[in-house]
Image (spheres, grey):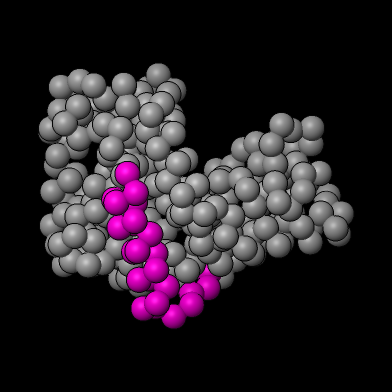
Amino acid sequence: MKYFLNFLFIGVLLLQSMEPEAAINYRIVWKENFTESEKTKVESWLSTCTQAVSTCLGDYPFEVTYYMHRRENASEPVPWANTIRNGEQGVEFYIDPTFDLKDFLDDWTAPHEIANLSIPYVGKENMWFSEGYASYMQYLIMVEMDVLEQDEAEERMQERMNKIVGKYNTTEDVVSVNRALIAKHNYPAAYWGGACYFAHVNKALMTEKGVSLMQVIQGYQSSNRLSDASLEEVISSLDIQSGTRLFRKWYELFLNAPSKDLINRKSIQ
């Protein structure tokens, strides 16, 4: 497991050493009343998350808006969040501000949702792709935030795979399995099945080109991020950006090859 995930984290180091520090332009809109101390805590959390995302995935070519809603007496600091794609790019956060700053930083929701904005919305039918992408990125971003150590991120990814691998022990293709899981509201399984696509692509990029998925995504921000409007366009653009056909190759495998041949306990390694 560590051998492949080390490929992934070497990619993080390459990105940091080769690219200048990026910054995502964002604003916060407070939808309910928050005290000044609560605002300070939330601002610190979002600043840390946003800077880590920008370091990993690049400077977004648009302003991001964070809408903050109160949800007190929750069991976790961020019980719900979702991206906004209706003419603006942003995230609706539903938070319990009584939690400590450390609790917010330890939560994966903000890295996941902010990372989601680095690629266009590709339709509900392709949720496995977009949510798989954000799921794959979330723990890497938390490593950049100094919230997780590399070993901890590896362990969390493997735990997710161990829980869902049995769903893919079939000759049916991955995309069909993922869409069926989403129809049954088994979102975690579908998302981490989708994350395996990016794990395979990242390994191939590092092996064949010496570049990481994150480096490709960073370049994508200033090329086709604002012009692509479909999954086909995104995959084509990422292949052009990387100088490969790896995104297309693995997409076609996920469309056609048996799930059991593509997704197993080692797929995320």
Residue 72 location (% of width, % of height): 79, 36
Q: Which residue is more in the foreground, 124 or 182?
A: 182
Does residue 9 sit above or below 200 in this rendering?
Answer: below
Q: Is residue 6 above or below residue 129?
A: below
Dominant secondary structure, magenta: helix
Residue at point 17%, 46% (across, down): 250
80 or 262: which is nearer to us? 262
Q: Is residue 195 left or right of residue 134?
A: left
Residue 37 image point, x, y percent = 85, 58
Residue at 14%, 42% in the rendered image: 252
Whether 4 is among the magenta residues is yes
Q: Which residues are magenta?
A: 1-24
Q: Considering only vertical position in the picture, is 28 above or below 33?
A: below
**Residue 63 visible here:** no
Which quarter of the picture shows residue 14? bottom left
Horizontal side of residue 144 vs 103, given as left or right: left
Q: Is residue 41 visible?
A: yes
Q: Position of residue 131 (x, y in %)?
A: 40, 42
The answer to which quarter of the image holds residue 98 is top right
Question: Which residue is pictured at 54% across the width and 52% down the height?
Answer: 148
- Left or right of 92, for residue 43: right
For residue 26, which quarter of the picture? Answer: bottom right
The front one of 189 and 223 is 189
* Coordinates of residue 24 in the picture (x, y in percent): 53, 69
